[in-house]
Amino acid sequence: MNAFRQEYKAKKVSLPQALELVSDGDKITAAMAGSEPQGLLAELANQYENFKNVRLITCLTMGDYGFQKPEMKGHIFNESWFYGSTDRKFHSEGNISYIPNNLHEAGEKKLDNDNIDIFWGTATPMDDRGYFSLSLGLTYEKMMIQDVDLVVLEINENLPWTLGDTQVHISEIDQVVENKAPLIELPNIEPGEVEMEIGRHIAPLIEDGSTLQLGIGGIPNAITECLKDKEDLGIHTEMFTDGMVDLFYSGAITGKRKTLWPGKMVTTFALGTQKLYDFLDHNLAVEFQQGNITNDPAIIGQNYKMVSINTALQVDLTGQVCSEAIGNKQYSGTGGQADTHRGAQRSEGGKGIIALRSTAKSGEISTIMSELPPGSKITLGRNDVDYIVTEHGIAHLKGKCIRDRVKAMINIAHPDFREQLRKEAQELQLW
């Protein structure tokens, strides 16, 4: 047994033993999404009565551990950089609170302005040289490892070994726990006809040789379907998805014309199906970098023909974009939307695109509104907005006055709501 294996053995503990180093009042940051430490979080939930006033900081939690439920009050309080479905469901119970942030500086701001005691992450099994791969997440995870006093890694042999800046050494870790858990999967959403029409509008905006940032869901999947005849596309994205795998195998992605990391698909975290995770394993074409690099607008803007494509919940007639809340109700989070939309517009030939369906609730309401609901959170201000796209067309708002923006937005609203929007715009003296 070499020295690294001996060190690993000395640092290996059980899940209950890992909780013995948690004290009342501690602040614990957990890795996000597909990198979620399922065993440690479940153990904390099981033992919650043993703790008082522990703060748990998460991002896009995928499992339902119950931290937001009333019985946790006084024991575990959850802060989140990005809400998932369970967070939304139990927000009204009052035991979770959203952390406003832009992804590229979320971890740094937390470390600079709060005292984080413990980091819980996930990693692949260690190699013979003492290194692990942080696998599916590098958004803030490595930054926490480098700055937090107590670092615990949950080792899961099912995780893919990813490349880039994902490697950490056993000497940097205080404890390891082993937990062979099924990987967290997010089912691929098949786009419907409305989403496909949005994709068909967006495809002509993307030139051969462009570098792309895409999210996840029906609209991004439709867009990738519409890009398979493009040439020499590149990827510089916060989130790596199944759609990018399909686009790569179609031959559209080569990365040959990329300014930064030519030939590499750059990302900071991945979430999808097993197909995606198999693709990432030891894949020399994929480069994981920390979120303060992938999402820094100054870095994004160095890519030639950078195109950022994000989705929204609602947009007003002047171009204010709400992507994370419905009125005062937090739905998701800012994530990297502002980072990538701004960064793309710094790029030579770059574009920032916001895509959304023109209606919600089975066509009952328009997502294009004269005014956003009271309490709405502005994810992307009208000063920053570039393109807005629905299934009814494209509104290019950049540099346009309010009068021209209103006309362009009404033209891409659902026909059933256009006359109402014209009347409301007149009443508000928008034109």
Image: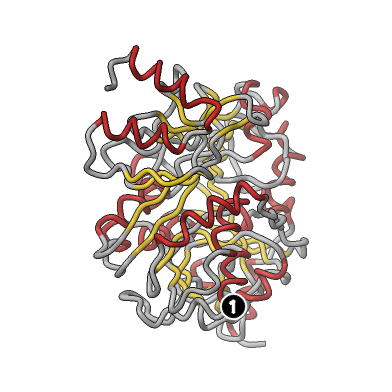
Amino acid type at circle 1 is Ser
Q: Residue at x 61, y 46 (%)?
A: 194
Q: Which residue is drawn at 55% across and 81% down?
A: 251
Q: Position of residue 108 (x, y in %)?
A: 36, 50
**Residue drawn at (68%, 36%), measured in percent from left and top?**
86
Q: For residue 64, what is the image quadrant?
A: top right
Residue 390 shows in this picture = yes
Q: In the rendered image of this protein, does residue 159 appear above or below residue 186?
A: below
Q: Quadrant of the N terminus?
A: bottom right
Where disc 1 sits, the SS reads loop
**Is 305 left, or right, of 69 in this rendering?**
left
Question: In the rendered view, does 68 fall on the left or right side of 302?
Answer: right
Residue 22, image quadrant: top right
* Colour pattern of the rendering: secondary structure
**Foreground: 248 or 101?**
248
| The C terminus: image quadrant | top left
Residue position marked by numbered label 1 in the rendering:
250
Residue ID at (61%, 48%) = 21
User: Is residue 145 at least partly visible in the picture?
Assistant: no
Q: Is residue 145 above or below residue 86?
A: below
Q: Is 53 in front, or is 253?
A: 253
User: Which is more toward the observer, 419 or 221?
Assistant: 419
Q: In the rendering, at what x and y percent does residue 98 appear?
A: 50, 33
Determine the image quadrant of residue 262. bottom left
